[in-house]
Amino acid sequence: MFGKHLVERGLLRESDLIEALDRQASMRVSIGRLAYQMGLMTLDQVMKVLEAQRANPAKFGALAIDLGFLSVDQLEKLLETQRGSRVPLGQILASLGFLSPEKLDQELRLYLENKRA
């Protein structure tokens, strides 16, 4: 993992990496937004699921299936898309000011070279 590489090289503290990873996790595109953007749900359906979440703390996808707005296959596709939609860790590290974009580029090249070897 690139973050571990940066910690091992003394360029990033573990606490900074955890903060960046937390930020990365929170920056994923929501399932509701993805479903709407991909044309799988209407805005009205998304809003109904969000309203249902107020009374039921279930996950968006589970409620959307229960309400008949999504199939299991559609939710799986959305989750796969969501996993691939994360903001790159390096971009978050730079935005938080932990490393400069130039240093990140240099370290990413080194990391990838070592990974290939």
Image: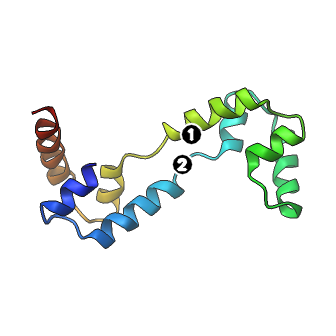
- In this rendered view, identify the residue nearer to me: 96 or 65: 65
Examine the image and state in which quarter residue 33 appears.
top right
> Looking at the image, which residue is at 56% across and 33% down?
81
Give the structural element (helix, strand or loop) at label 2: loop
Q: Position of residue 67 (x, y in %)?
A: 90, 41
In space, the residues marked 2 and 1 are separated at their CA atoms by 7 Å
Give the mark nearest the N terminus, 2 or 1: 2
Looking at the picture, the colour scheme in use is rainbow
Disc 1 residue crowd, few under 14, some 14–19, many 20+, Cα 10 Å = some
Residue 28: image tag: 2
Say if residue 100 shows up in the picture. no
Examine the image and state in which quarter residue 51 appears.
bottom right
**What amino acid is found at the position of numbered circle 2 in the picture?**
Arg
Q: Which residue is mark 1?
A: 82
Q: Position of residue 21 (x, y in %)?
A: 40, 59
Would you say the residues marked 2 and 1 are in contact, meaning their CB atoms lie under 8 Å apart?
yes
Q: Position of residue 39 (x, y in %)?
A: 73, 27
> Looking at the image, which residue is at 46% across and 62% down?
22
| Quarter containing the C terminus | top left
